[in-house]
Image (cartoon, rainbow, N blue to C red):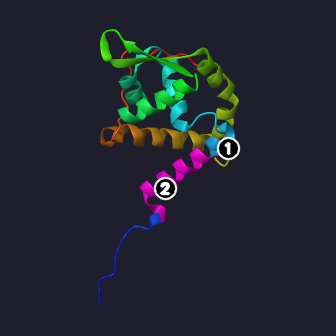
Amino acid sequence: MSDPILRESLYTQPGHLLRRAQQISASIFHDEIGSQVTPMQYAVLCVLLDNPGVDQVSVAGLAAIDTSTAASVATRLEEKGLLSRRVDPANRRQRILTLTDQGRDLLQALNDAIGRLHQRIFEKFSPQEEARFMELLQKLVDVNNHQSRAPLTTAKNPISNKV
């Protein structure tokens, strides 16, 4: 006879619940945004709005994505006309990324959809529950950032431009 396996139920494991929460968020994102941009592309556009003229490697850190993914996302966004890339004269291996007028207009147009996404995610939460959840989620992300394969970095000179 073998010993029973003692383990936490899958449905109460934080990793499983976080993965499910991300699935739900991505599904609602696609419901509200459609195929205009992906969640990762949206994140890169937001980083560029707040950090105009930043290099591609810095965009990766500010969006907490790996550099090869940032490069492919930037290429797709450039093809869509939402950002421009140019060689950095100070470091020819780097690309400077800039949000285009079309990219800025898209972010402006997505404001209502992003608001609906937020409302749908938290529709069953009281304002206090939402605030507490966001506080704890931010803490979880902050205290574990160093364990990420693509940790979030901070901007050297962040510029706060809200859409």
In the orientation shown, which residue stands out farthest toward the front?
79
Of mark 1 and mark 2, the one earlier in the sequence is 2
20 sits to left or right of 146: right
What residue is pinned by disc 2?
A: 17
Name the element at disc 1: helix
What's drawn in magenta, residue-wise?
Answer: 11-27
Displayed quadrant of residue 86: top left
Identity of the residue drawn at 49% across and 21% down: 48
Identity of the residue drawn at 58% across and 26% down: 80
Image x and y of residue 130, in percent: 58, 42
Q: How many labels were placed on the picture?
A: 2
126 sits to left or right of 39: right
Displayed quadrant of residue 149: top left
Between the residue at mark 1 and the residue at mark 2, the CA separation in whole angstroms equals 21 Å
The local crowd at label 1, few if under 14, some if 14 to 19, many if 20 or more residues have their Cα within 10 Å, is few
Image x and y of residue 36, in percent: 63, 33
Q: Amino acid at mark 2?
A: Leu
The local crowd at label 2, few if under 14, some if 14 to 19, many if 20 or more residues have their Cα within 10 Å, is few
Identity of the residue drawn at 58% across and 19% down: 162
Up-down relation of residue 91 to residue 116 (above or below): above
What residue is pinned by disc 1?
A: 31
In the orientation shown, which residue stands out farthest toward the bottom?
1
Depth check: 133 or 64 in front? Answer: 64
